Image (cartoon, grey):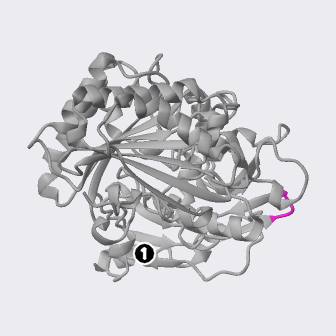
Amino acid sequence: MSTKLSRRTVIAGAAATAAGAAIADPAAAETITSPSCLAPAPPSVIVPPSDARYGDLVRNWNGRFTGSPDYVQVVNTTAQVEQAVQAAVRAGRQIAVRSGGHCVEGFVTDPAVKAQIDLSGLNDISFDPRFNAFSIQPGATLRDVFKRLYTEWGVTVPGGSCPSVGVGGHFAGGGFGALARRNGIVPDHMYGVEVVTVTASGRVKTVLATRERNDPNRELFWAHTGGGGGNFGVVTRYLMRSWNATGTDPTRLLPAPPKASRTINYIFPWPALPEPAFIQLLTNYMAWYLRNSAPDSPFTALSASLIAPHVNTYPFLLMTVVVDPTEAGSADLVAAFKSAVIDPLGLPAGVPVVQEATMPWLMATNKAGFADTGDVVGRRNKAKGAYLKGLYSPEQLSTTYRYLTATPSIKAPLAAVMFNPYGGKANALPSDATAVPQRDSVLKVMHTVHWDGAALDAQMLGWLRDFYRDVYSATGGVPVPNAVTDGSFINYADVDLADPALNTSGVPWSTLYYKDAYPRLQRVKAQWDPTNAFRHALSIRLP
């Protein structure tokens, strides 16, 4: 086996033109004065299907989906967003908004969408002293956010591990990443949100909503702390300041990231993991998280992910442990984790293979996550998620082993179940503090498969759906909220949860994602998007 592995290696016409021209004149839209004070920007651009740029703008990261809107409008300011939304509403065109293009479902590319608004030009990252908060626009990517916040002010937000994700949907859906255990999730650091909305009369209105108790728009802010993207309006910027931050020094208003990243990869060859050993490894791993995920646990400084791929994808499992080696006691945390999770397996000498690297924190953020270059470009995929707050049953463990080792059931560039670190500071706030109600979970699970070519759609989708359904067969094929599971994560969007043939639990998809927060989200929807101008397959429904 090669010892040169990394996390990235592992996971790793005329009528249309006329339609575009019909809204090219900004005077055709009502301009609402925006509270933003941004630098002058280029004018918006309307791209119809006849334009060579159209093909790139209607494709997203998931190769399964290609959009067919009447036009794509690339915008650069809040005023341009207002004009774009107003023109689409007046023409009766369904709207979809794209920031980074990483949605795992076809929400933006739905054939019903006739006006796609591209936010990639809204990518400013700055400090706004009027609100004592950082202003981050939705077209900025996580790579840009991490770099700018850290190099300018020495701070960060605990966002995800895929650097090319746009923050627009990531933040609104309750984004999280490798720092969640030590710093909470992204909504815990949101102070406000600027949103272009549509009133009951069809008039466009830009609203600034904050978490201040006396803010009359506070519920609109709250809905964007995990209520998902594409539900209430077009976010044109987020204001970021940690919930417990004090003072006016920007360097103290968001978390300081680790100084460095020590990454230890434990590589378990499949031949060394017969079913009993696999079950013990997964049980030890889950049990460790149950014991060490209180918000005040010293182990919030340690993050350990587990990627279990199908044997035909990779011949090994990968467990990745990350700590800051400059922090006192970090080596003891690693040793304690290994003693509890790996050592009891009694594996042969040399198993697992251990690889280790230490690098500065910012550099490390570019090493992990899904790539969107090379062979990954255009690849098709499907994902299904779950929150875990208890141990898998013996039946669930055996089912997982069976689906990952059965041959020749599937052969794909990536077919796997991934266990992502959670708990710790992610569980520090009450369940109703944000629109993310899952505040006692300790792991997030993603079942996923990637493949090349539409000819394999039925096989790959069938494998993943069967795998997920059988793991959660005791609860109707989905992770219903109970003592072990706690529903799913809206940023792991999965339209199957709304299909009664695939979700036989009797628990609606809205409860799986939002639990008791859903009625409150519906009230926000009714107030701020009463005409349902912003909708998709899993959008918040009007009450």
Please tell me which residue lies in front, 164 or 192.
Answer: 164
The answer to whether residue 129 is magenta is yes
Find numbered disc 1 in the image and state the secondary structure of the residue it sits on: helix
Q: Can residue 291 be seen in this view?
A: yes
- Residue on which the image places disc 1: 20
Residue 112 image-quadrant placement: bottom left
Image coordinates for residue 392, horizontal then vertical, percent: 37, 22
User: What residue do we see at 26% from left, 31% from top?
Assistant: 400
Image coordinates for residue 7, horizontal then vertical, percent: 40, 56
Image coordinates for residue 77, horizontal then vertical, percent: 64, 71
> Is residue 19 shown above or below 248?
below
505 sits left or right of 436 in the view: left
Q: Can residue 487 be seen in this view?
A: no
Identify residue type, mark 1.
Gly
Image coordinates for residue 408, horizontal then vertical, percent: 8, 43
Q: How many labels does the image show?
A: 1
Segment tinted magenta in the rendering: 128-132
Residue 48 image-quadrant placement: bottom left
The answer to whether residue 4 is magenta is no
